[in-house]
Amino acid sequence: MIEFQSVTKRYDDGTVAVDELDLTIDDGKITVLVGPSGCGKTTSLRMINRMVEASSGTILVDGADIRSQRPAALRRGIGYVIQNAGLFPHRTVLDNIATVPILLGTKKAAARRRAEELLDTVGLPRELAKRYPAQLSGGQQQRVGVARALAADPPVLLMDEPFSAVDPVVRDDLQEELLRLQSELGKTIVFVTHDIDEAIKLGDKVAVLRVGGKLAQYDTPATLLAKPVDDFVAGFVGRDRGYRALGFLSAHGVEVAPLSTLTLGEPAPVVTGWTVVVDERRRPLGWLSAKSTVEGEIRSADLVAGGSLYVADSTAAGSLRAALDSALSSPSGTGIAVDAEGAVVGGVTADSVLKVLDAARRSGEVPS
């Protein structure tokens, strides 16, 4: 557990970056600090490992005042991941990851073996081990940065906007990878971002900070979206917070109706409505419109893009947000529902999603 007790950071010019911060960060969870520029989120993070010294107040890690340890010793027990990875350009991937264990006294051969294992953990092929950072993509560099932070198996991991410098697709992959790793490792993670969507996706709890380092609200993502404490928080989480909140509601109970399908390459019949075209494994390729004029076999060029897919796995239904998005993004008004293998199992409509949402409201599942 990490505790901020009336922590203030005031610089020599009088600027207050963090103001009387009281915050308790739970063990084994992801806590996200989010807010506009100048709200003190990065300063708060860096005070945990004493890269920035607090002006007043106390920070405890597992009940011990961080000032009772030398900064260098404290930092060796806390993983740290920053934007652009911060890798040593003159060291290979393997030696970058092995840096901290070697500093802690681990023999080089053992540290490198551990580094190879961590490549597997963060989803990187071992053939990258001998490359240098400049030879990697941005997403690969960030994964190496996470592996390096995990190399000494620290209980606490600090992450300062680690995914903000990569493109949206890579960023989404890195977020999913972090959630997977956390489900396996159960670290205490403090994550800084300026992106409320990232905060809501990753955080078990989210701390929204105001400019000047004042804590505005500290809650679960679902509560933050449903019950912002004031206009500042409501404005920061966005006007579409009701739609975002659907991500926390299970789509269990959403009707998956039968959906007409055709297979790519088969002779085109007379189409009377929208029809999903699938491959030989029933994976959706796109829609065939009733307005289409197809002669002979159905070709890829005849298809209309299908929108997002809703994974309706029988073992774990997706979210209402995913189900609704698939319906809204579909050219036919019916979202394509697939199983865990990506095969079409049926379709979902916005009306069917809203019926489940209404039932959730009446049952009290949706906060009022």
Image (tube, grey):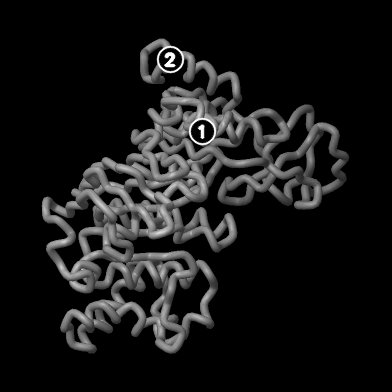
**Image mark count:** 2
Residue 58's spot in the image, x, y percent?
Answer: 20, 50
Q: Which of labels 2 and 1 is toward the front?
A: 1
Which element type, helix, strand or loop, lies under badge 1?
A: helix
Q: Is residue 218 visible?
A: yes
**What numbered label is drawn on residue 261?**
none
Decide if residue 250 is on the left or right side of residue 182: right
Return the residue nearer the eye: 153 or 16.
16
Return the residue nearer the eye: 205 or 51.
51
Residue visible at 39% across and 60% down?
12
Name, please, the residue furthest toward the top.
362
Residue 324's spot in the image, x, y percent?
Answer: 57, 30
Decide if residue 305 is on the left or right side of residue 98: right
Residue visible at 24% across and 58% down?
156
Residue 126's spot in the image, x, y percent?
Answer: 39, 79
Q: Could you give the CA–CA distance between mark 2 and mark 1, rounded to whole angstroms?
A: 16 Å
Q: Is residue 346 visible?
A: no
Residue 45's spot in the image, x, y percent?
Answer: 34, 55
The kind of residue on which mark 1 rests is Arg
Residue visible at 37% across and 52% down?
179
- Which residue lies under the disc numbered 2? 361
**What numbered label is drawn on residue 244?**
1
Quarter holding the C terminus? top left
